[in-house]
Image (tube, rainbow, N blue to C red):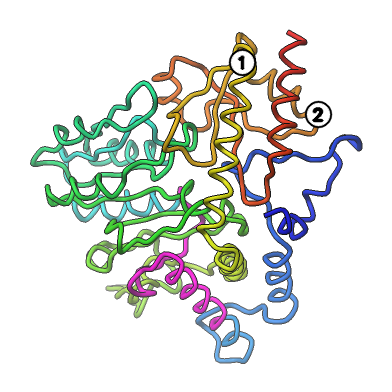
């Protein structure tokens, strides 16, 4: 996979004009290949015009690019129709869209949403806002000490008021790959739809929403080598057709009068205002990029890196790794002795090593783990075993300082 590093100019940077960049913060955002940046630059220089509204040549061409990008996303997820692909600003907006729109249509005071103990704040706070507005309640799937979902407890959480299950495909802290197919099977047996937060799965292995049979699936472009500010909500048509619009304005309407507004067809009903049509082109190029490499190749490479990192990190005195030993994907969270995670991250940065520190937008999970925060190394297709070695050597240098 090293051949692809040349597509990412930033990986050649020197940090503090001294150390080669070792970028291990990919769960937060990935770097962008030349192909993505060049495609966006090309559109801004030669095609830029507002989409869907103009009869002139540039507008038609920009519209074609955006709709071809929608088809690229549909194909990448194996969705049944482009009507099921809604462009958003990212996973967070996608989850909020479902919470507000699905909640308005299908939830009333006393209804329940099931989430898990390992969720990102986006998949907690969105439902708490609905809780404050409608009076719904949250039920939480606990996790085992090694970071696995307690599916035996999930079965017991369903009641006659359960309206939705919303879970992460992969934990952004523990790296746990959740058995979402089983979660969906159990939920559907109770006639309850499921939303899957795919922010940490989509960049790392193939996703098939029809095989998974999820009702909603969300992911962010910037975590899969695409631009920031663009993401996707996949939803089954039977749900999207019934859900009211999330926002009002241009593009999501058919007709407007002072007495009444009629709404546009899917997916445009949920895409109010001028979209970031250049970013959708960048997202499509990013998906084409990883597809050309092969998601199976990427998954195998990152699995090897993760296993190698686990082995090497365990040689460090005082090392504690959080999450499962197996069934883990591209993320390793750790602490070393009594060294504060912020101190570790700051000192590694002085060696050119970029990791993430803190609660990782998962404070309830931190409380479950009994810590304030962790250090997190996360991997992408361009990372190497040599970079893992650099991480371990850096941690050893910091450890000896303390």
Disc sitting over residue 336 in the figure: 1
Could you tell whether 9 is left or right of 325 in the image? right
> Which label belongs to residue 351?
2
Is residue 118 at all visible to an observer of this figure?
A: yes
- Please tell me which residue is depicted at 13% across the width and 52% down the height of the picture: 191
Is 382 a magenta residue? Answer: no
Q: Secondary structure at mark 1?
A: strand
Query: Could you say which is closer to the camera, residue 177 or residue 200?
Result: 177
Residue name at image x 47 percent, y 48 percent: 199
Q: Quadrant of residue 313?
A: top right
Res 258 label: none
- Could you tell me which secondary element the residue under label 2 belongs to? loop
Report the predominant secondary structure element of the magenta stretch: helix
User: In which quadrant will I find the N terminus?
Assistant: bottom right
Q: Give the x, y percent position of residue 112.
A: 19, 39
For image coordinates 44% across by 67% down, the residue present is 272
The magenta-colored residue range is 63-92
Q: Residue at x 51, y 56 (%)?
A: 89
Asked whether 241 or 361 is in front, the reply is 361
Nearer to me, 83 or 355: 355
Task: Check whether the beta carbons of the residues at disc 2 and disc 1 lie within 8 A of each other.
Answer: no
Placement of the C terminus among the 4 image quadrants? top right
Q: Position of residue 233 (x, y in %)?
A: 40, 59
Q: Residues within 10 Å of mark 1 (few under 14, many from 20)?
A: many
Task: Please report whichever mark, 2 or 1, sits nearer to the chain's N-terminal start.
Answer: 1
Find the residue positioned furthest to the left: 160
178 on left or right of 159? right
Q: Above or below — where is 352 with respect to 39?
A: above
Sort mark 2 into few (<14), some (14-19) or many (20+) by Cα contacts within 10 Å: some
Tell me, yes or no, whether the highlighted magenta stretch contains residue 87: yes
């Amino acid at each position: 996979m090293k051949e692809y590093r040349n597509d990412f100019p930033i990986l050649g940077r020197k940090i503090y004009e001294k150390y080669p960049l070792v970028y291990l913060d990919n769960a937060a955002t990935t770097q962008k290949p030349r192909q993505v940046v060049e495609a966006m630059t090309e559109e801004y220089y030669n095609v830029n015009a507002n989409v869907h509204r103009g009869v002139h040549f540039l507008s038609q061409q920009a519209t074609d690019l955006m709709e071809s990008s929608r088809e690229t996303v549909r194909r990448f997820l194996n969705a049944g129709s482009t009507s099921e692909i809604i462009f958003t600003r990212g996973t967070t907006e996608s989850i909020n869209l479902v919470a507000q729109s699905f909640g308005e249509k299908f939830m009333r005071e006393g209804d329940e949403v099931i989430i898990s103990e390992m969720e990102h704040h986006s998949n907690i706070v969105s439902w708490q806002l609905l809780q404050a507005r409608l009076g719904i309640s949250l039920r939480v799937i606990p996790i085992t000490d090694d970071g696995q979902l307690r599916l035996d407890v999930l079965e017991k959480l369903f009641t006659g008021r359960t309206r939705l299950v919303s879970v992460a495909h992969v934990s952004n802290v523990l790296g746990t790959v959740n058995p979402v197919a089983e979660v969906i099977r159990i939920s559907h047996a109770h006639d309850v739809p499921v939303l899957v937060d795919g922010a940490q799965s989509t960049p790392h292995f193939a996703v098939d929403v029809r095989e998974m049979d999820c009702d909603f699936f969300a992911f962010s472009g910037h975590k899969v080598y695409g631009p920031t500010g663009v993401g996707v909500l996949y939803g089954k048509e039977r749900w999207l057709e019934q859900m009211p619009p999330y926002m009002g304005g241009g593009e999501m309407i058919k007709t407007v009068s002072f007495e009444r507004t009629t709404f546009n067809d899917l997916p445009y009903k949920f895409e109010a205002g001028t979209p970031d049509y250049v970013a959708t082109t960048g997202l499509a190029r990013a998906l084409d990029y990883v597809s050309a490499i092969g998601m199976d190749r990427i998954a195998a490479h990152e699995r090897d890196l993760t296993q190698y990192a686990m082995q090497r990190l365990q040689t460090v005195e005082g090392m504690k790794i959080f999450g499962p030993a197996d069934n883990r994907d591209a993320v390793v969270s750790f602490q070393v002795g009594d060294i504060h995670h912020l101190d570790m991250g700051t000192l590694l940065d002085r060696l050119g090593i970029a990791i993430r520190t803190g609660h990782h937008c998962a404070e309830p999970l931190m409380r479950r783990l009994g810590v304030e925060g962790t250090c997190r190394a996360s991997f992408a297709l361009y990372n190497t075993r040599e970079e893992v070695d650099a991480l371990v050597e850096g941690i050893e240098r910091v450890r000896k300082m303390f």
